[in-house]
Image: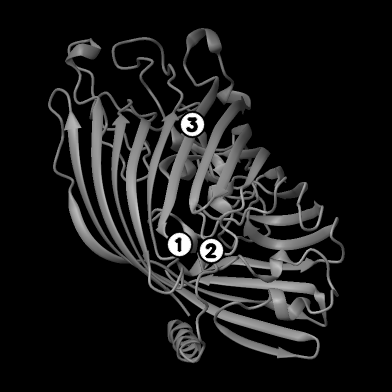
Amino acid sequence: MAKFWFTALALLVSAGLWAAPAMANSEDASGVENIQRGGAEGAADTTLGSKGLNFETDGFSLNVSTRVQFRLTYQNEVANGNDGANGRDFINFRIRRAKTTFKGHFFQKEFQYKLILGWTHGAGDIIEVAYFRWAFHQYLNVKAGQDKLEWNWEEISSSSNMQFVDRSYVNEVFNQDYAKGITIDGQVGEDTPWLKYWVGIYNGVLAGDADYRNSDQAIVGERFNDGVVDGEMMLNLRLETHPLGEVARGMNDARGEDEYDKVVFAVGLGVNWMMAGFDSGNAGVRGDTVVAPTASGRFRTNQDTWAMTLDGHFRWHGLSVDVAYFWRHTEFHNRGANRFSPSGQADVGNLNDSGFTFEVAYFILPQQFNVGIRFNMLNAEDFWQGGTGTDTPRARGLRPDTTEIGISVNYYIHGDNLKLTFDILWVGQQVAIGDNFNPLTGESDDLMGVYNAPPGRVLGGGSLGSSESDHNDLWIVRLQLQWIF
């Protein structure tokens, strides 16, 4: 099987080398998903296949493109406070992404399809996107399959046209990732999209037992309680308005000189509700004393999470401003022996997390050279667990409160198809005591971070003042070469 995938990829790369790349459009800027209504005269010529290898016959079209991101990363960790644990520094090369996209239509232009294979993923996660879309009307279209969930702007913008090497810290904590289900979408207004909407129902697969957001990329079976499928469902809605003209998805103003003097802006709102069971014994968040599920095989603990985001996007003369606010509320519900007793403060009642992102970028040379800055903050919930003794203060948390500040530079050799990105980030983390803290070993395995897993914080002498390091700083320098063919 490995030989088959390698041969297939080699053939795709060889074929793609014969395709002439476009200059500056992002991967999704002119893809089939932007056709709002099927059957329009000339639709296939103007909206399908801006890069890659194109095939088109009567009733069928195929565009094949491959995106590769080769990255060098240097990370330096500095822990602040008493007995800070420094030294988890590294420098390494990696293939961050290698993806092949197949997209087009068959039979009629309104019958659209898309398939993205991520070669850097594990065997069970190689399929990133696989959907069929019936684009039969501007106001109403139906999509079935797997795709990035239309919830927040930064996550659903292609990684090929980010301003920084990768998305922000806060985005990685709140985004809803890939989802399998059915989406209905539409647009009011043609040249001026007064309203765009996406609404759908999906699986709600937890990213982790202590990470209450969706992540449904893996291929799973149709059976009860396989560690993923346990009555998990999710509803999602996103609304956008572009009152002065459409703002292209992305994190900068890459329009050409013929149009970049026009002011455009967009405002978006995302609302998501998800319910799911999870293994409270492994997570250590609820009911540590009972690890096994009930006699029926159901998890003893489930959760309901409401997540909302509000974002705004401004473009003018090569200047872009992108802002977003995130809020998430998680409630827990236990069964049987895991029932919750708020009076004893033995378990977590609920969690409220929030954060915001702010990015500004400017093209010093239109479509050739730009610079950007980033500032985002995460406010993660602190909570009591297991009483109020020395080893169980309110300083517990599932992840650290975090501030991220960064600068970036992009040089576009052939637009997004061939570009260099350089960025520098400072990430400050307020290290919490982990949710699975063991006072005997002083270890905390479940404390999560985006760029690293911060070391557990241990209390000594019965006071916070004599604890180990309570802040953790990261300096991250990245250089990335991207090519798309």
Is the residue under label 3 in contact with that under label 1 (CB below 8 Å)? no
Q: Nearer the viewer, residue 443 or 411?
A: 411
Number of the front mark, 1 or 3: 1
* Residue that mark 1 sits on: 366
* Residue at the image position 23 percent from the left and 10 percent from the top: 463
Q: Is the residue marked by circle 3 packed among few (<14), some (14-19), or many (20+) residues within 10 Å? A: many
* Residue that mark 3 sits on: 355
* Residue that mark 2 sits on: 257
Determine the CA span between mark 1 and mark 2. Answer: 7 Å
The kind of secondary structure element at disc 1 is loop
Label located before the other in sequence (3 or 2): 2
Determine the CA span between mark 3 and mark 2. Answer: 35 Å
Determine the CA span between mark 1 and mark 3. Answer: 32 Å
Q: Position of residue 109 (x, y in %)?
A: 80, 77
Q: Position of residue 95 (x, y in %)?
A: 34, 68
**The residue under label 1 is which amino acid type?**
Pro
Q: Is residue 262 above or below residue 135?
A: above
Is the residue under label 2 in contact with that under label 1 (CB below 8 Å)? yes
